[in-house]
Structures are given as structure tokens and as C-alpha cells.
Amino acid sequence: MADPERSSSQAGTIGVGVIDGGHDDESLAQDIRQEVHDWLRRAGLKSSPVDIPGTGSAIGPFMESVIQNVWASLLILALSKAFVFFQGLKDRKNLRKFHQTQRFCLIQLWDGRGVSRNAVELLRLLPDLHAHIWQLFPNRAYSFSISSALNEPRIETVHIKLEGYDDLRLTVWQASKMLYRMSGTPFAFMHLEDGPYGSRRISLNAV
């Protein structure tokens, strides 16, 4: 049974959730989550632990509302990207085989700071956070998921997923530049996807 204090992010904090190895495998997930929590605290940000959906743990109302928006955007994204996905299916399959020697690890950051939410601020932290976590827990293919917002330009909800990156600092800069060009968007979904010849590109979908 989940600890009630660890089932949802506290108001005014950044919720931290980790899936290490898969939805049914807790393994070192709590150790990684605690290290991310401590790293954010040292960076001057308040955070709280969050249990990831799929592990049998409860989720808070803030996460539920964000997940609903994410699924709406994912549906639109799936329809628009279906043809491209099937064209690149063979390359993606080979890429998964290449990364099979690494353990999958997803780190989710749920920005519950209200009007102070800042997606770009969290984006800029990722390169240093990734370097720190990788030193402590190596042999993992880390992905990051951020649910946040922006005040200027005004974007009510931003969901960002970065995975399979080569140069995370360049990726963060490109993603931030794309977000700063937007304004008045109720919901934006950004993710890093595979491009031709092993390249990476950022896709941004606004609703």
C-alpha cells in the first residue's frame, strides 16, 4: 500500500516521479527519486515525491488533470504522426535493439507551483540533473517528462518529453527557443523524436 505522503505532489512544489526498468519494477526507483528530490532542493526548488501511475499507487488531482490534457494531445499527435511513424518503424525497432543493454528510466517532473510554474526553468536544469543522476545510477537510458506552464509567452499547459537525446544542452536550447516563440496557447505538447539517418528533432504540437 502506498504511503499517503508519497501519493501526490504537495501544493507549491515540483512533484518528482521515477519509473526505473518498467511500470511493474520498482527496483531503485525510490532511490533515484530521492536523489532527484535532493538535487532540486540544492538547486533552490521545493519538491515532493510522487508515485507514478501504473505501479499500483494513487495519484493526486493535479496529476489527474494533467494526464487528461496529455492524453488529449497524444491523440491529436498520434493522428498527425501515424504515417511518419510507420515509415520509420524499422529504424525505431533497430534503435530499441541497440539500447537493450541499457535499463530504461523515466524521470517525471510535475510543476505544481501555481502561477510560478516555469517550463523553461525546469528544462534548463535537465543537463546538469542528468549528468548528476547518470554518475550515481549508470547504464540507464534516461528520459525526462515535464508538465508545467509559461507566463511569458502565455502557455497554460506545457508537456515536454525528451528521450533518446545525444546533446541534451543543445536540445534544451532548441526546445526553449520554440516555446518562447509561442503565445496564448492553452496546451502545448513537445517531444524529441527520431529523425532521418539517426538524427534527432523536436516536435511541437499546440492545441
Image: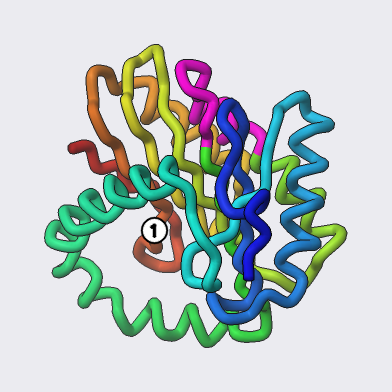
Determine whether the residue tagged by mark 1 lies in a helix, strand or loop: strand
Asked whether, in this view, residue 127 is left or right of residue 112, the answer is right
The quadrant where residue 158 appears: top left
The quadrant where residue 152 appears: top left
The C terminus lies in quadrant: top left
Total labels drawn: 1
> Residue drawn 58% across and 54% down?
7
The N terminus lies in quadrant: bottom right
The quadrant where residue 204 appears: top left
Asked whether, in this view, residue 187 is left or right of residue 114, the answer is left
Residue 133 placed where, x, y %?
A: 78, 54
Residue 197 placed where, x, y %?
A: 41, 67
Query: Magenta includes 93?
Result: no
Most foreground residue, 186 or 2: 2
In the rendered image, the vertical position of residue 99 relative to residue 117, given as above or below:
below
Q: What amino acid type is highlighted by mark number 1?
A: Glu
> Residue drawn 44% across and 56% down?
200
Decide if residue 166 is in sight here.
no
User: How crowded is the residue under tag 1: few (<14 C-alpha within 10 Å), some, or many (20+)?
Assistant: some
> Residue drawn 60% across and 67% down?
19
Query: Magenta includes 113?
Result: yes
Asked whether, in this view, residue 26 is left or right of residue 22, the answer is right
Residue 38 placed where, x, y %?
A: 82, 42
Most foreground residue, 141 or 51: 51
Residue behind mark 1: 193
State the scheme by which the image is colored.
rainbow
Asked whether, in this view, residue 106 is left or right of residue 69, the answer is right
Residues in magenta?
A: 111-125
Decide if residue 12 is in sight here.
yes
